Image (cartoon, rainbow, N blue to C red):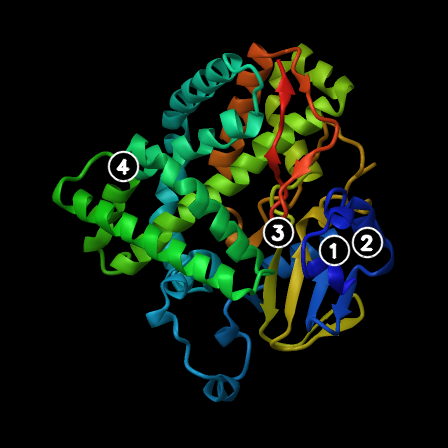
């Protein structure tokens, strides 16, 4: 079992669901001795771990103070990558997480989403028109990848000519989050990417300080007068997090939506007949092919779950992709049903770290699906075998050739 969590392999990752079914039936809470962490796959346990304040993100909050004093001091102040990750709300606990999240949350309110909707619809339609002109269209490169880049770049205030810079940066940080490549070569690559993207946003923030615009960076700068406002380093790190998290997962959502629909022609036909099911279809894709397959937490005290004791300081990998196929929660979980209701999946996690950008991702997925179905009702796959990207944390396609 430990090998599944060490590196990508076609055997496990082209179709992880039989493995998840095994975990759910035989080892819903399993300790991997050689890796030193737990694996939780059952919906009830995953949801509990994500919501219970006993489970935290920061190691310093999970172990006794005397243990921390025995550890070497972190070198993040001299490490560009460490400086970014240390200031990502994704990896922080309250009260820092609460402060960071509250300062950014205004960008994802229902009013903001309503204002963005026409713009996102127009972007999706423009990309679909561009894809129609290509002799051998790749849905990922031509549509799924650029759409969220354009959206989050416009929200942040990134100039159009700079969007292409984010492609390699985004993929590099996705591999950083996965955490399975410990090679010196990748460490150097990740450090360089962190330095480059931090420098980029540092210059953009400086420009907005001298000439504010109607964008998220200008709004966050304006809020710096508050007592609990973002520091400059937190502001840079938050911009990077919004870019990476907002882009990587939405690319996967759009690609997984099209792939799953085309692999289920009866559901594809159903959606064409009833386009009002688009929002429900997005929720079912999120459950059925979750763009993020897992996350992790640390136990800050001993905790018993299902008759097993997770000790203080131990890490737990919570398998979102497995929990979303749990037969104890979902009837016929391996069946793709765009009308499924209720559908309380955990694709966006739950608890205090529930995905802040979930409303935006849902809207992008729905509008993308609508634009593609309307323009290309006869779309089909050009390749039989999906080209899954080699990443065990994110589930998404590297390319997807289609016939329009």
Image marks 2 and 3: residues in contact by CB distance under 8 Å: no
- Residue 33 x, y percent position in the rendering: 75, 74
Q: Residues within 10 Å of mark 2 (few under 14, many from 20)?
A: many
Between marks 1 and 3 in the image, the one whose residue lies nearer the viewer: 3
Return the mark for residue 24: 2
Q: Is residue 27 visible?
A: yes
- Quick one: 372 or 346, which is closer to the camera? 372
Nearer to us of marks 3 and 4 is 3
Contact (Cβ within 8 Å) of mark 3 with mark 4: no
Residue pointed to by mark 1: 41
Q: Residue furthest right?
A: 26
Q: Residue at x 36, y 26 (%)?
A: 115
Using the numbered discs, state the Cα–Cα distance from disc 3 to disc 4 in whole angstroms: 31 Å
Task: Determine contact: label 4, label 1, CB under 8 Å.
Answer: no
Which residue does the numbered mark 3 point to in the structure image? 393
Tell which circle, 3 or 4, labels the residue nearer the N-terminal end.
4
Q: Position of residue 314 (x, y in %)?
A: 64, 74
């Amino acid at each position: 079992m430990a090998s599944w969590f060490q590196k990508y392999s076609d055997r496990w990752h082209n179709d992880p669901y039989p493995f998840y079914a095994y975990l759910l039936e035989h080892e819903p809470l399993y300790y991997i001795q050689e890796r030193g962490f737990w694996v939780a796959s059952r919906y009830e346990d995953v949801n509990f771990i994500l919501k219970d304040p006993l489970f935290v993100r920061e190691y310093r909050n999970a172990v006794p103070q005397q243990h921390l004093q025995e550890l070497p001091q972190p070198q993040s102040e001299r490490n560009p990558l460490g400086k970014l990750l240390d200031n990502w709300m994704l990896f922080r606990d309250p009260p820092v997480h609460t402060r960071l999240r509250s300062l950014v949350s205004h960008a994802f309110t229902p009013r903001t989403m309503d204002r963005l909707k026409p713009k996102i619809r127009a972007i999706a339609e423009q990309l679909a028109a561009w894809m129609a002109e290509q002799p051998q269209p790749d849905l990922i490169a031509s549509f799924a990848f650029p759409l969220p880049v354009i959206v989050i770049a416009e929200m942040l205030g990134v100039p159009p000519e700079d969007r292409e810079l984010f492609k390699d940066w985004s993929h590099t940080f996705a591999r950083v989050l996965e955490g399975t490549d410990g090679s010196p070569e990748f460490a150097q690559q990740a450090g360089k990417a962190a330095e480059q993207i931090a420098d980029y946003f540092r210059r953009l923030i400086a420009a907005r300080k001298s000439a504010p615009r109607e964008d998220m960076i200008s709004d966050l700068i304006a809020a710096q007068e508050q007592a609990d406002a973002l520091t400059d380093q937190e502001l840079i790190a938050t911009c990077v997090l919004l870019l990476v998290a907002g882009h990587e997962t939405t690319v996967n959502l759009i690609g997984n939506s099209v792939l799953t629909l085309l692999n289920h022609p009866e559901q594809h036909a159903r959606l064409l007949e009833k386009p009002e099911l688009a929002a429900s279809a997005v929720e079912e894709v999120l459950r059925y092919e979750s763009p993020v397959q897992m996350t992790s937490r640390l136990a800050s005290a001993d905790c018993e779950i299902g008759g097993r004791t997770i000790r203080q300081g131990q890490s737990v990998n919570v398998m979102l992709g497995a929990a979303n196929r749990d037969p104890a929660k979902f009837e016929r979980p391996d069946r793709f049903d765009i009308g499924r209701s209720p559908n309380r999946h955990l694709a966006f996690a739950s608890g205090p770290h529930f995905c802040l950008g979930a409303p935006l991702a849902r809207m992008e997925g729905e509008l993308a699906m609508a634009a593609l179905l309307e323009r290309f009702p006869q779309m089909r796959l050009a390749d039989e075998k999906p080209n899954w990207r080699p990443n065990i944390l994110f589930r998404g396609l590297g390319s997807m050739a289609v016939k329009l």
